[in-house]
Amino acid sequence: MILENLSLARQVDMVFREIKNELLLLTSGTVFIQIRSNIVGKFGVRHDPLECKGGVIREVRKGLSEEQFASFRQMAIEALKHKKNWTHGEIYFEFAVKQNVLHASINLESNYNMAQVVMRMNHHSHDE
């Protein structure tokens, strides 16, 4: 499978399907996806800190339900509509289940490379 041939939405769908089993064990955390040239590279889940009391780690509660996971995955795909005019960056999906309701927020981060900008400017100045 060649990633260049897959839409970014399809790649995000693949990311969520890959980390599904991990998300089904979590009630909160952050999913991160790094994008370079509109291709997903590194991705993963940053778990919220484990709570300890008296030197004992608190038992992990049940994570996302199948329905909450499906909703979260669809929200992540829909969030791509807000990615405008950039090809390199990161997307962070913070989530928490509170009173059995999934709450999520999305942070889009664009990244630029000065070497690329200078190279493009030099290329345009040679064309004139």
Image (spheres, rainbow, N blue to C red):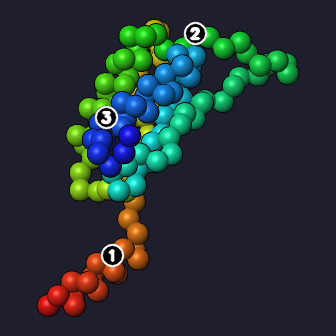
Q: At which x and y percent is residue 49?
A: 66, 30
Residue 31 seen in the figure: yes
Q: Disc 2 marks which amino acid?
A: Lys
Q: Residue 79's image quarter? A: top left
- How far is the residue under mark 2 from the one under mark 1? 47 Å
Q: Is residue 56 left or right of residue 114?
A: right
Q: Which residue is mark 3?
A: 10
Using the image as rendered, state which of residue 95 and residue 126 is in the foreground. Answer: 126
Kindly indicate the quadrant of the structure image that contains residue 85: bottom left
Dot 2 corresponds to which residue? 62
Residue 67 in percent (x, y) is at: 38, 10
Q: Which label was assigned to residue 117? A: 1
Residue at 36% across, 45% down:
2
Residue 4 drawn at (x, y percent): 32, 49
Determine whether 52 is above or below 81 in the image.
above
- Can you name the residue that lies furthest to the left here? 128
Q: Label 3, label 1: how many angstroms apart (C-alpha)?
A: 29 Å
Residue 13 occupies which quadrant of the picture? top left
Q: Give SS at disc 2.
A: loop
Judged by depth in the image, the label closer to the viewer, 3 or 2, is 3
Q: Residues within 10 Å of mark 2 (few under 14, many from 20)?
A: few
Quarter of the C terminus within the rendering = bottom left
Name the residue rendered at 46%, 47% in the picture. 41
Nearer mark to the viewer, of 2 and 1: 1
The structure residue drawn at horizontal position 21% and vertical position 83%, both measured from the top left corner, is 124
